[in-house]
Amino acid sequence: MPNKQFSGRRSERRASQRIAEAILDYVGHTPATAEHRKERPESRARAIARTAARQAAVTAGTLTLPPGPLGWLTLLPQLRALWKLQTQMVADIAGCYGRTTELGREEMLYCLFRHTDAQAVRDLVAGIGQRFVVHRASRPEVQAVALKIALHISQRVIGKVIARWIPVFGALGASAYAYYDTSQVARTAIDFFAGVIDVEVEEEATTDGAQDKTLRNSR
């Protein structure tokens, strides 16, 4: 039994590492968008969100269809396909609000995963009402946040894989979850880009070696 538990934990760590690497691949490169600032950005942003949620549902349902052990093979591609679609959606929503130049890896991580692991992304973006303070993190800090999120996701993997042994019901469940997940990402993005965003900027080190932090308002 201890050996099985150790093997399970080791497998979970490997899965988490691969998921974290996939997360970093997507948040490190902001997709280009054809969207421009709109007079009524929320209306356009919600239309983008509805289209993306439907596309996510179709994609997830299709990739979930292989039954049995083949289901394991489609899990990471499913996550990658979902994140590719969601990062584009976030970029398009940012464009609607005229905030494209302000969309970096911290903002993307926050929008994609706040509903998944609010505790982890709190180290990058702190929200108080309609005001958000963004902490420009170092690469190791971003990697640590991505790993926390990946661990959270990997803990749900077993349930998803079990569902893949029943292909039809598994596909329906995955479609419904992808639709919900993408809708939550859109909701976070709309609230974020509609708010006041302050970016925490570190000033040069002082004579005693300390660094001062100031806030730059980006709206």
Image (spheres, rainbow, N blue to C red):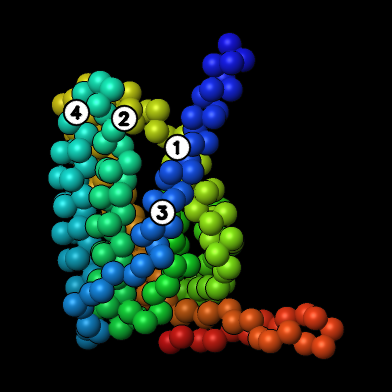
The circle drawn on residue 15 is 1
Label of residue 66 in the image: 4
Occupied quadrant, residue 195: bottom left
Image x and y of residue 27, in percent: 40, 62
Q: Amino acid at mark 1?
A: Ala
Q: Which residue is mark 3?
A: 23
Q: Which percent across, then down, holds residue 178?
A: 26, 45
- In whole angstroms, how far apart are the C-alphas of marks 3 and 4? 24 Å
User: Secondary structure under badge 1?
Assistant: helix
Coordinates of residue 43 in the picture (x, y in percent): 20, 73
The answer to whether marks 3 and 4 mark residues whose Cβ atoms lie closer than 8 Å is no
Q: Nearer the viewer, residue 14 or 214?
A: 14
Q: Who is closer to the viewer here, 108 or 53?
A: 108
Of the residues under marks 1 and 4, which one precedes in the sequence?
A: 1
Residue 72 image label = 2
> Real-space Cα distance between discs 3 and 2?
18 Å
CB contact under 8 Å: marks 3 and 2: no
Under tag 4, what secondary structure? Answer: loop
Residue sitting farthest toward the top: 1
Does 178 sit left or right of 142 as displayed?
left
Residue 93 seen in render: no
